[in-house]
């Protein structure tokens, strides 16, 4: 396989993985209005748990210490990693959602992400501290006899299948009554509560589903890369996914695909393969980071709805207005689903 083809399959994997991550955050932020600045923490939980479950017991002299070590086959470890992110999200939501809203919730969540970072970074027996997990076995590599050149396109295809399944699930969720109620709680939580909707329950549901997507995305990344450490989930990574959601289109799953292609891939992964300028190591990556900031400001100023804006959904059933004075009925235009909970 030529280096160019290998490189293109690598980029394709990151497009699919970041689509999954973006759909999870888009459900929380774009549909539910939850400013989850700790999103990368849930990605990390999914990655660490998936990796630790896929690895065997730590060997003496290997330089690694971690919990689990059950050598579970793919995709059992991946699913359990997503569920672990859900459990962590449940604990966070129960402790914070009932008392905090909007800005205060965002501040607590980003603080929680930093605390989680310090715990995993310093408590070595958990997930090997700052060195992280390495030598995570490649799924199906032994059973199918895959070498590094054939594993990359194979696993990119596996990730595509998983992304299509999760795309279908997310589309069903956002088009369902659950999705309509989430948008109502996002736009006016007081009005939704007055109409009998349990805002906490719906936000909790969005938090759990979105965190499951985060855990699955993180698990796929560690299975593909074979390693994961604390340098891969600094708080800036959360804002990278936020930028992809905003650029692509908040509340639009199709827009997230475009956002994943533009921000995490073209502006983050692509510069990693560009040779450094002689005498200026790291300059390319710094320029790419600044370019993301400029792009985000440009989009927020000129097109805040994103490249592909949120689609206005309308009810298929027309509303019938009953005239009280004349006793006649009048058919109105279809109501927006944001107005019909």
Image (cartoon, rainbow, N blue to C red):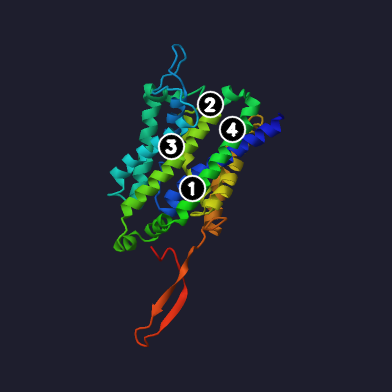
Relative to residue 52, is residue 21 depicted above or below?
below
| x, y percent for residue 210 | 43, 45
As rendered, which of 16 and 169 lies closer to the eye?
169
As rendered, which of 292 and 155 lies closer to the eye?
155
Relative horizontal placement of residue 93, taking residue 261 as reference (left or right): left
Outermost residue to the right: 2
Query: What is the distance, in whole Å, between disc 1 and disc 4 at their CAs?
Result: 21 Å
| x, y percent for residue 85 | 40, 37
| x, y percent for residue 318 | 46, 72
Identify the residue shown where x is 48% and y is 30%.
Answer: 231
Instruction: Write down the residue under mark 3.
Output: 82
Residue depth check, mark 2 versus mark 1: number of the one nearer the observer: 1
Characterize the local packing of mark 1: few (<14), some (14-19) or many (20 or more) Cα atoms within 10 angstroms: few
Instruction: Write down the residue under mark 1.
Output: 169
Query: Mark 3 falls on what kind of element?
Result: helix
Query: To which quarter of the image does residue 194 belong?
Result: bottom left
Identify the residue shown where x is 38% and y is 39%.
Answer: 86
Relative horizontal placement of residue 108, taking residue 162 as reference (left or right): left
Is residue 280 in view from this perspective? no
Query: To which quarter of the image does residue 143 belong?
Result: top right
| x, y percent for residue 75 | 49, 32
Instruction: Write down the residue under mark 4.
Output: 155
Query: Mark 4 falls on what kind of element?
Result: helix
**Reading the chain from its start, which is encountered first: label 3 or label 4?**
3
Identify the residue shown where x is 36% and y is 45%.
Answer: 107
Query: Mark 1 falls on what kind of element?
Result: helix
């Amino acid at each position: 396989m030529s280096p160019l083809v290998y490189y293109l399959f690598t980029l394709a994997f990151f497009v699919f993985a970041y689509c999954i991550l973006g759909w999870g955050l888009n459900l929380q932020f774009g549909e539910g209005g939850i400013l989850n600045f700790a999103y990368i923490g849930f990605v990390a939980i999914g990655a660490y748990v998936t990796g630790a479950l896929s690895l065997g017991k730590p060997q003496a002299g290997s330089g690694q210490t971690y919990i689990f070590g059950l050598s579970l086959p793919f995709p059992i470890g991946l699913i359990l990693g997503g569920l672990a992110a859900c459990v962590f999200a449940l604990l966070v939501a129960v402790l914070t959602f009932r008392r905090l809203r909007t800005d205060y919730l965002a501040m607590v969540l980003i603080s929680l992400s930093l605390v989680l970072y310090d715990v995993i970074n310093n408590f070595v027996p958990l997930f090997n501290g700052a060195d992280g997990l390495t030598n995570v076995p490649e799924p199906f590599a032994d059973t199918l006899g895959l070498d590094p050149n054939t594993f990359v396109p194979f696993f990119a295809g596996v990730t595509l299948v998983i992304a299509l399944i999760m795309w279908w699930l997310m589309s069903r969720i956002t088009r369902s009554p659950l999705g309509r109620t989430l948008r109502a709680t996002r736009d006016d939580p007081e009005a939704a509560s007055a109409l009998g909707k349990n805002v906490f329950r719906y936000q909790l549901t969005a938090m759990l589903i979105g965190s499951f997507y985060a855990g699955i995305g993180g698990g796929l990344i560690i299975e593909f890369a074979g390693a994961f450490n604390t340098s891969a989930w600094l708080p800036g990574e959360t804002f990278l996914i936020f930028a992809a959601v905003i650029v692509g289109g908040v509340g639009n799953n199709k827009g997230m695909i475009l956002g994943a292609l533009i921000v995490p891939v073209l502006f983050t992964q692509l510069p990693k393969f560009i040779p450094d300028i002689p005498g200026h190591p790291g300059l390319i990556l710094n320029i790419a980071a600044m370019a993301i900031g400029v792009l985000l400001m440009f989009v927020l100023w000129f097109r805040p709805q994103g490249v592909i804006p949120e689609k206005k959904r309308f009810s298929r059933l027309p509303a019938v207005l009953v005239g009280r004075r004349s006793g006649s009925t009048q058919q109105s235009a279809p109501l927006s689903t944001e107005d019909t909970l």
